[in-house]
């Protein structure tokens, strides 16, 4: 017997309408706040990096003679040696730091020559850069405190260069003719022009970020103290006369290297474990397996980094061959043992999803691990003469204790619960009637899962992979404590790395606000933010396309 419908009073109906409207407004306000917060963050990052791309200029000033002290160039510019291999020089100067020479040859060609680090006392220098050809009577003036210099000639044409970036930053045509000489202030912020009859003119140099250019971030560059161009990140040294090096290539490679190795370890294990948990485990077992895995997601990454750096890294160094055999041979041995049991009749097809599946898998896994461990010892004795790391050293393969293998294993362990949880949710949301229908048509349980359930949940699985990748790209603490933080440009599994996120954590406290170093760090944060945002947007688009493709299921 059905109960009569309860009549709602007008006052209660009005209360419900007001409550629903208030909830909708709160949801709209929350969504708008998130969008505004992301937009504000991007605008802040963009605004802080914008000055890096500003242009330099030289401005005339009239009242600086009493406040600015100018120093004759001979006071801080001793005569440099003339590099062998260059044309007859009309004029040459040391750059700040006396590690490279700028000269104008007999044809008006301006070039930079670096001292050979292997032969510092020799005149055999390395040609680094060439600048536009000017007049043969062009004179040069080095700026104190930077790698910048000025060229000028009697016609009054003054040009500002920076040797590190190789760019001409500014140009000024003076009317103080004929121009005879230029003096520079002690801080390099002003220059004083003087013609042959003693008239003077003061110019202010506005040059906030001369040692930055977009090419420096992504191209190999030849720096002082090096023999060939390379990708280098180095922002500090034990002297203030060095060249700051701002290449993003080693940091980008370190970020991708850590993410790739972590995903190679985490993705297959997490997805296969989610498939087994969602499609083959009983409800009772699943009720405690999934919460246990999700609980591991809340484990602090700083603790994982501590364990990786102080326990896992030394352990892998002592048992490298055994560890690699466990990673590579365990899956193969597990498949081989399962096939052997199936072929001998000890394991029947009807038992593969029954017979207390989880205890059986754990027993077979333990057997495979023991066999892989023993095989690792035998292979190290047979192939590597008892010590794999010494054999690698003789082959020219460098091994660092904190390397990509340590980071991949521990960071993969950190992101595995995220991928597992989202993948399991996507699989469990597929209607069970689809799998039952496939099995009714003659498919095995495994075929029904692979050909029906997994394609239907493909959108959710792809979202889990992308979210796990985003987590790996932005991970900081594990990389800080277990990667060695060496900015190298290689994908070697046995060498360290430095990621963009870890570099921000290391160098932000040391960067002076509004300096080139500070703004380059902000630029790296902007690139990391944009790459993650674009990747997640593409993931949403692909996920939506997959959903539309498989929604007929």
Image: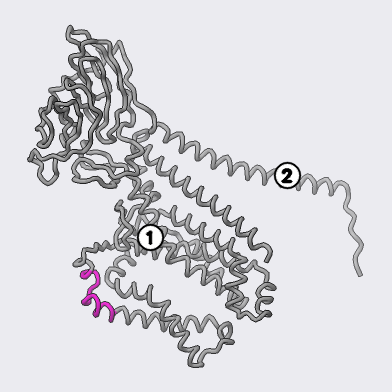
Residue drawn at x 38%, y 49% is 500
Residue drawn at x 21%, y 66% is 395
Instruction: Indicate left or right for 39 with 56 as reference.
Output: right
Cα gap from disc 1 to disc 2, whole angstroms: 45 Å
- Determine whether the residue tagged by mark 2 lies in a helix, strand or loop: helix
Look at the image and tell me in which quarter the C terminus lies: bottom right
- Where residue 22 is drawn, which disc sits there? 2
Q: Give the range drawn in magenta.
A: 377-391
Instruction: Indicate left or right for 1 with 397 as reference.
Output: right
Q: Where is residue 532 in the image (x, y as percent from the top left)?
A: 48, 49
Look at the image and tell me in which quarter the N terminus lies: bottom right
Residue drawn at x 34%, y 22% is 57
User: Which secondary structure type mostly characterizes the magenta part of the structure?
Assistant: helix
Say which of 71 and 544 sits in front.
Answer: 544
Q: In which quarter of the image is residue 14?
A: top right
Q: Where is residue 379 in the image (x, y as percent from the top left)?
A: 28, 79
Say which of 21 and 371 sits in front.
Answer: 371
Instruction: Indicate left or right for 33 with 67 as reference.
Output: right
Q: Which of marks 1 and 2 is nearer the N terminus?
A: 2
């Amino acid at each position: 017997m059905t109960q009569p419908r309860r009549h709602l009073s007008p006052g209660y109906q009005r209360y419900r309408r007001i409550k629903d409207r208030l909830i909708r407004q709160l949801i709209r306000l929350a969504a708008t706040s998130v969008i505004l917060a992301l937009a504000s963050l991007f605008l802040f990052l963009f605004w802080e990096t914008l000055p890096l791309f500003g242009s330099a200029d030289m401005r005339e000033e009239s009242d600086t003679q009493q406040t600015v002290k100018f120093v004759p160039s001979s006071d801080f510019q001793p005569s440099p040696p003339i590099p062998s291999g260059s044309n007859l020089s009309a004029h040459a100067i040391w750059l700040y730091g006396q590690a490279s020479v700028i000269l104008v040859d007999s044809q008006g060609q301006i070039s930079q020559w670096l001292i050979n680090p292997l032969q510092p006392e020799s005149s055999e220098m390395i040609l680094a850069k060439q600048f536009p050809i000017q007049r043969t009577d062009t004179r040069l003036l080095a700026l104190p405190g930077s790698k910048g210099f000025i060229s000028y000639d009697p016609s009054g044409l003054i040009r500002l260069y920076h040797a590190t970036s190789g760019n001409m930053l500014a140009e000024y045509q003076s009317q103080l003719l004929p121009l005879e000489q230029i003096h520079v202030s002690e801080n390099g912020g002003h220059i004083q022009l003087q013609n042959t009859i003693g008239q003077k003119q003061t110019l202010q140099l506005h040059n906030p970020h001369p040692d930055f250019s977009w090419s420096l971030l992504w191209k190999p560059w030849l720096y002082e103290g090096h023999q060939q161009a390379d990708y280098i990140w180095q922002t500090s040294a034990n002297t203030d006369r060095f060249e700051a090096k701002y290449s993003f290539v080693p940091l980008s490679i370190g970020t991708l290297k850590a993410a790739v190795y972590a995903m190679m370890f985490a993705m297959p294990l997490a997805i296969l474990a989610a498939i087994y948990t969602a499609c083959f485990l009983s409800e009772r077992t699943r009720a405690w397996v999934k919460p246990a895995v999700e609980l591991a997601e809340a484990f602090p990454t700083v603790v994982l980094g501590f364990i990786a750096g102080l326990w896992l890294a030394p352990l892998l160094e002592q048992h490298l061959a055994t560890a690699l055999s466990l990673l590579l041979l365990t899956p193969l041995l597990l498949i081989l043992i399962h096939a052997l049991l199936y072929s001998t009749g000890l394991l029947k097809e009807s038992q593969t999803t029954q017979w207390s599946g989880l205890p059986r898998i754990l027993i077979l896994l333990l057997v495979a691990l023991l066999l892989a461990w023993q095989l690792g010892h035998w292979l190290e004795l047979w192939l590597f003469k008892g010590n794999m790391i010494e054999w690698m050293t003789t082959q020219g393969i460098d091994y660092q204790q904190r390397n990509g293998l340590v980071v991949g294993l521990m960071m993969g362990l950190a992101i595995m619960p995220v991928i597992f949880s989202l993948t399991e949710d996507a699989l469990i949301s597929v209607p069970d009637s689809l799998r039952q229908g496939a099995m009714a048509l003659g498919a095995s349980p495994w075929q029904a899962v692979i050909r029906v359930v997994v394609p239907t949940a493909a959108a959710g699985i792809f979202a889990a992979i992308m979210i796990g990748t985003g987590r790996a790209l932005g991970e900081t603490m594990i990389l800080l404590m277990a990667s060695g933080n060496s900015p190298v440009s290689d994908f070697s599994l046995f060498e360290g790395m430095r990621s963009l996120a870890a570099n921000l954590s290391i160098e932000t406290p040391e960067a002076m606000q509004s300096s080139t170093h500070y703004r380059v760090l902000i630029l790296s944060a902007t690139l990391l933010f944009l790459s993650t945002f674009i990747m997640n947007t593409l993931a949403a688009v692909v996920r939506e396309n997959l959903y539309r493709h498989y929604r007929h299921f």
